[in-house]
Image (cartoon, grey):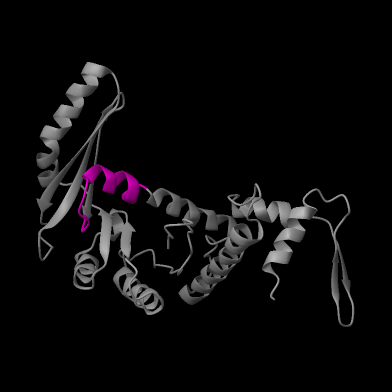
């Protein structure tokens, strides 16, 4: 989830898909549950579903159309789309040859795949550079400038994907158990760990150089340190070395996250 003011990326769920199933398995059901929960808290909030082409499924798009959820989803190329974009690609190629600079053009089309129940708005990106031609397609319910929708909304998913990859440093990829439920439980534990570190980063370390640090860096800097644990009858004391260079940051994070 992204907030317009703070641009906070919050993990909402973690679901392990069996490797022999469709990449979008149960995504429509999960989206339905998340939307219902978000709208229970914020009834008037606008929700935009964003994903790569692996989530471009008629069931998901149709549900969004029926329930007032906007979407910007990648669309795999095919012969029909390539024919539509051919004139735009030729223009980009000619401009690149003329200027020597990378050219990026955008166009919009009304397109309906055979598996779709209706035609939808597709944004096409035609790019040509020294590396050759590059084209991308996005299906969306949003109205407005195609370039802005593609670059400001769709491409912004890159930051989201970086946060997903960041969970790898918290061992979310360790799914070697023999049963699915055991592996799903491991993934949930990793998700909890990421959520805790995200709170430390966003709240505890606000205003410091670590506010955008990755979880692996935070673990290394704030957990992998020498300390003495004094386990008394009523009090547990954690004694850090006086030479710990980040003790001020540690104390700040502890104070901000301590329950009131």
Query: Is 232 on the left or on the right of 100, as rendered?
Result: right
Q: Tell me, yes or no, whether the highlighted magenta stretch contains residue 146.
A: yes
Query: Is 137 on the left or on the right of 109, as rendered?
Result: right
The residue nearer to you, when weighing 192 against 79, is 192
Looking at the rendering, the stretch of residues picked out in magenta corresponds to 140-155
Is the residue 139 above or below the residue 116 in the image?
A: above
Res 64 quadrant in image: bottom left
Is the residue 180 above or below the residue 127 in the image?
A: below
Q: Residue at x 65, y 46 (%)?
A: 209
Query: Is 15 on the left or on the right of 250, as rendered?
Result: left
Residue 85 seen in the current view: yes
Where is residue 223? Give x, y as percent.
Answer: 73, 58
Q: Which residue is drawn at 22% across and 18% down?
A: 97
Q: Quadrant of the C terminus?
A: bottom right
Q: Residue at x 23, y 70 (%)?
A: 68
Q: Tell me, yes or no, whether the highlighted magenta stretch contains residue 218.
A: no
Where is residue 162? Give x, y as percent.
Answer: 47, 51
The residue nearer to you, when weighing 157 against 208, is 208
Query: Is 168 on the left or on the right of 99, as rendered?
Result: right
Is the residue 90 above or below the residue 167 in the image?
A: above
The residue nearer to you, when weighing 210 against 256, is 256
Residue 23 seen in the current view: no
Where is residue 211? Give x, y as percent.
Answer: 61, 52
Number of labels in the image equals: 0
Q: In which quarter of the image is the N terminus?
A: bottom left
């Amino acid at each position: 989830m992204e907030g317009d003011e703070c641009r906070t990326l919050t993990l909402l769920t973690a679901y392990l898909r069996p490797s022999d199933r469709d990449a979008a398995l149960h995504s429509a059901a999960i989206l339905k549950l998340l939307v219902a929960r978000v709208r229970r808290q914020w009834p008037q909030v606008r929700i935009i579903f964003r994903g790569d082409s692996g989530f471009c499924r008629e069931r998901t798009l149709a549900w969004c159309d029926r329930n007032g959820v906007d979407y910007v989803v990648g669309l795999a190329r095919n012969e029909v789309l390539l024919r539509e974009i051919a004139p735009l690609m030729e223009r980009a190629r000619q401009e690149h040859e003329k200027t020597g600079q990378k050219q990026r053009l955008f166009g919009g089309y009304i397109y309906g795949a055979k598996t779709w129940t209706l035609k939808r708005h597709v944004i096409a990106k035609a790019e040509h550079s020294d590396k050759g031609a590059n084209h991308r397609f996005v299906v969306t319910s949003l109205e407005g400038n195609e370039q802005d929708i593609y670059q400001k909304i769709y491409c912004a998913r890159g930051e989201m994907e970086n946060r997903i990859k960041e969970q790898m440093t918290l061992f979310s990829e360790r799914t070697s158990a023999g049963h699915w439920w055991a592996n799903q439980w491991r993934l949930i534990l990793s998700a909890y760990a990421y959520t805790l570190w995200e709170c430390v980063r966003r709240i505890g370390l606000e205003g410091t150089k670590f506010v955008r640090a990755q979880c692996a860096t935070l673990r290394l800097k704030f957990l992998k340190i020498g300390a003495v644990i004094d386990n008394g009858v009523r009090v547990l004391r954690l004694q850090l070395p006086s030479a710990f260079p980040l003790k001020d940051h540690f104390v700040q994070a502890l104070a901000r996250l301590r329950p009131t």
